[in-house]
Amino acid sequence: MKIDVFERGFSPTPIQELTDACPGNRVFLKREDFLPFSFGGNKVRKARHFYREILECSADVVMTYGSSSSNHCRIIANMAAAMGLPCHIISPEENYRDTPNSRMVEQFGAVVEKVPLSGISRAIEARKTAYQKSGKNPYFIQGGGHGDPGTAAYEECYEEIHSWEQEQGISFDYIFHVSGTGTTQAGLVCGLLACRQQERTRVVGLSNARTLERGRPVVVQSALSWLEHVYAPRTGRRISEDEVERAVCFEDAWRLEGYGCYNNAVVRTVEEAMKRYGVPMDTTYVGKGFWAMTEYVKREKLAGKNLLFLHTGGTPLFFEDRCGEENAG
Ligand SMILES: *Cc1c(COP(=O)(O)O)cnc(C)c1O
């Protein structure tokens, strides 16, 4: 019998309060890192939706793209292994390193094809065509789980948050999270608009890599794509581009020099989170984002607000940070 990888055992992820994380405001943490598959994280929530599509179109090879420290690649390789399907990962050859995530990917039996960054899209197309020519039916997932299924996953996550607010009688003024490919943010914004909560709650995407010019349009386009292709046909309701534009708050003030860059304040945030709350955070995503939230709160002089921060996972990176010296070079 085939194992149903994702359909069982999933329930809303816990929300806990972190006392004194931003004095003068209440801070809550939603533990997406507790999603029950492969160390959790937002890529698991997205993967569940890709999983359904893979089953629906009876694909027999799973393909994706990502670097050697990619959480997304770990989860997709794990999912493919659990489904009994071969997995093919295209990875940039530059900076390819041995990491906890890359080791797991290899253990799951994925084929990792290392290609120079400049040749990535060509390599992906060539590989897809080669599989098709040999009679295979490959399913390609964009890097980071980008695309409508990924957006749908975070639209659902927003609904989960909204139900929690109603059950607990607490309403969030802000929802903060790290924005990378923009899919998580696009989904949350779609949820906010679908539930008509955009006047009450602000979703703030804290960029860990992209500049405003590069990152914001991707969030807007991803949200519009899901609203047009999935939401409008399902509900008959159209949400205008103008409404989407107004609901997207993308902050790049704390991206530092970009992906993977952090400072002493981020390191201190990570140490404090572990010591005070027992919550692991990494320096690339969650620790950097949590620090960025505290800076945002100071800059905007927020007081008396209810803030929710999404812990989007990346637990293997917590250990990668701790083995950084031995692994460097
Ligand atoms: C991928 C990732 C993000 C960013 O999510 P996007 O949907 O790509 O914006 C945030 N946190 C962690 C731990 C991630 O792995």
Image (tube, rainbow, N blue to C red):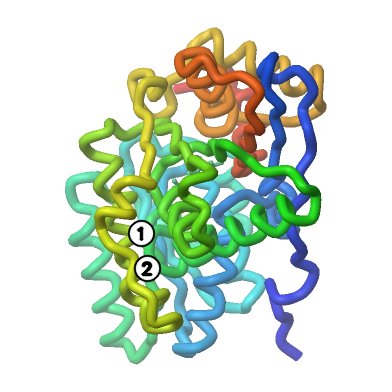
Residue with the most extreme front position: 199
Along the line of sight, the residue nearer the viewer: 309 or 55:
309
Q: Mark 1 and mark 2 in contact (Cβ < 8 Å)?
A: yes
Q: What residue type is labelled 2?
A: Trp
Q: Which amino acid does label 1 sit on?
A: Ala
| Label 2: element kind | helix
Is residue 76 visible in the rendered structure shown here?
no
Q: Specify the quadrant of the image occupied by residue 302.
A: top right
Q: Where is residue 220 in the image (x, y as percent from the top left)?
A: 30, 52
Label at residue 226: 2
Label at residue 126: none
Q: Image point 56% across, 36% down: which residue?
A: 174
CA gap, disc 2 to disc 1?
A: 5 Å
* Residue holding disc 1: 223
Q: Image point 23% across, 39% down: which residue?
A: 214
Q: Specify the quadrant of the image occupied by residue 51.
A: bottom right
Is residue 239 visible in the rendered structure shown here?
yes
Horizontal side of residue 13 vs 162, given as left or right: right
Q: Does the residue labelled 2 lie within 8 Å of ligand 1?
A: no
Q: Specify the quadrant of the image occupied by residue 109.
A: bottom right
Along the line of sight, the residue nearer the viewer: 182 or 309:
309
Q: Position of residue 304 (x, y in %)?
A: 66, 23
Structural crowding at the residue carrying mark 2, measured as other residues with C-alpha within 10 Å and reported as few (<14), some (14–19) or many (≥20): many
Along the line of sight, the residue nearer the viewer: 280 or 320:
280
Q: Position of residue 167 (x, y in %)?
A: 79, 55
Q: Image point 61% across, 61% down: which residue?
A: 159
| Quarter placement of the N terminus | bottom right
Residue 167, placed above or below residue 33: below
Residue 9, placed above or below residue 40: below
Q: Image point 67% across, 48% down: which residue?
A: 32
